[in-house]
Amino acid sequence: MNGKPDAVVVGSGPNGLAGALRLAAAGMRVQVVEQADRPGGGTRTEELTRPGYRHDVCSSVQPMAAAAPFFREFDLAARGVRLVQPEICFAHPLDGGRAALARRSLEETAAGLGADADAYRRLFGPLVEHGQDVVDFFLTSRLRRPPTRSVGAITHFGVNALPNVRWLAERRFRTEEARALIAGAAAHGMLDLTSPLTGGLGMLLTLLAHHVGWPLIEGGSQRLADAMITALEEQGGEVITGHEVTDLREFDGVPAVLLDTTPGAFVAMAGDRVNEGYRRWVARYKHGPGVFKVDWALSEPVPWTNPDARRAGTLHLAGTMEETVEGEAAPAAGRVADNPYVLAVQPTVADPTRTPDGGHILWAYVHVPNGSDVDMTAAIEAQIERFAPGFRDTVVERVTKNARQMERWNPNHVGGDISNGVPSLRQMLARPVPRWNTYKTPVDGVYLASAATPPGPAVHGMCGDLAARVALREVFGVRHVPPLRPPVR
C-alpha cells in the first residue's frame, strides 16, 4: 500500500478482519497488522499431527458464524466458505450407554428426552420460533439495537437466562438427560456453573443448534479467515504478518486504529497516553480459566458406546449435570478438576476432507486454572475411555498444548483464556470498562475491537463490526454505514 492508510487494524482474528471489511466497504484504505506469521487468530488451521491432517488450533464449531448479522451480510456461501453439518449437533453421553442428543429438529430433540419432552418444548419453542430476532438482539450492542417484533420471546429468554444453569435445569427438567444437555452447553462459557448468566449461555447455544445447527467449516476454520482476507484485498486492503506492535505511536497520522487485542495490550501500547482511571479499570479486568488441548490422529472413528454419539460433531464428556457443575467449579476456583468436563469435537464426522487418506481426527480440551502448565492428557483420555472403551487403541498420534502454550500461540489468550476475559455478569455489562461507548479508548482515534468488547467471545465478527461503525461515525463522519461489498466475480 502506497502512503499512509486511512485505518489500521492490529490483529487478524475474525473481529479484526470484520472491522477491516466494514471500514473498507465505506471506502477506507485499510491495513491489517498481525504479529503471527499467519493471519486468522483463533480461526487458524494447521497440520499438527500428520501431513495433510488439518486441525483447528482453537475455534472449530461455528454456529455463531452461521447466525450472526455480520456473516449473514458477508454471505459465506458466495465467498466459497461451505458450512457442513453433523447429523447430531452435540451429544452428552451418560453412563450405561445413554446419551442426551441435541439435533437440528426441536421436536426430535424433545422426543428423545422422554418425560422432559414437553418441558423442553416450552422452554425452547418460543425461542426457536423467533430465533433470528433473539440472536440479533443479543449480538448487537446497545449502540445499535434493532427494532424487534419478538419482545415476548426475548423477555422469555431474559427471565430464564439471568439465573445459573443449575437452577434453570432443576426448575425446568426432571431427567438426567435434559439437565445434562443444557449444563454441558453452558459449560462452554468457562464459568462456575452456579454463576448468574450460565443459564442464558446454555439456552443460547442450545437454541443455535435448532436455529442454524452447530456446523464446521469444510476444510478447516482457516477457510473463513482466508475468505475475509481475500475480500479485503479485493478492496485494496492489505494484511501484514510477522509484525508485533509495541507502541501506538507507530501509527501517528493514521486517522483510525482498531485493536483486536486484549485491554492490557492496548494499555501497554498506549503508554502514558492512557489516563490513570482507565488504567485501573483495565487492571481489574479478569481473565478466566485457561484450556489444555489435545489433538489426535486416529486409525478409526471413536468407538462411543452410544451409537448416536458417533454421528455427533461435538461431545460434552462429564456425566451428569452434578458432575458437570463440579468439574467446572474447580478451574473457576483455581484448582485442577479430578474428573473434568471435557469438550470434544470430531471434525471428520461431518468433514472427511480434513484428512487425505480416510483417516480421522479428534480434538478435546478441558478448563484449567489460568496460566497452568499442568498436563491433562491422562485425565482427558480417561473421560473419553469412560464413554468410548478402546479409544486409546485408536490413537496414532497426539499433540498437546497447555494453557501457557496457548498464550504463546495467541497473545489474546491470556493464561490460556480463549474468551479474552471472563464472560461474567459484571464483565458482560461493562466489557472491558464501565463506559457507555466501550469500543472507544482514551486515545483519540483508537478503538478496541476484540472479544473483550460487547457482545463478547465467539466467532461472530460483531465486536469488530461495531467498533468499525463507531470509528466511521466519530472519525470519518459516516452516518449511514454502507453494506459490505459483494465478492468480485
Image (cartoon, helix red, strand yellow):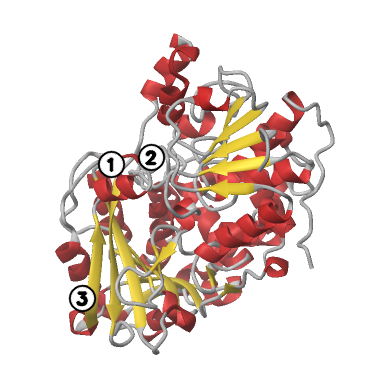
Q: Residue furthest front?
A: 2
Number of marks drawn? 3
Residue type of the residue flagged with mark 3: Glu
Q: Residues within 10 Å of mark 2 (few under 14, many from 20)?
A: some
What is the C-alpha distance between the residues marked 3 and 2? 30 Å
Whether label 3 touches label 2, CB < 8 Å: no
Q: Is residue 263 left or right of residue 394?
A: right
Q: Which residue is mark 3?
A: 385
What is the C-alpha distance between the residues marked 1 and 2? 10 Å
Residue type of the residue flagged with mark 2: Ser
Residue 69's place in the image compared with 444, above or below, is below
- The quadrant in which residue 344 appears is bottom left
Q: Which residue is mark 1?
A: 332
Q: Nearer the viewer, residue 280 or 224?
A: 224
Instruction: Where is residue 86? Give x, y as percent.
Output: 51, 77
Mark 1 secondary-structure assignment:
helix
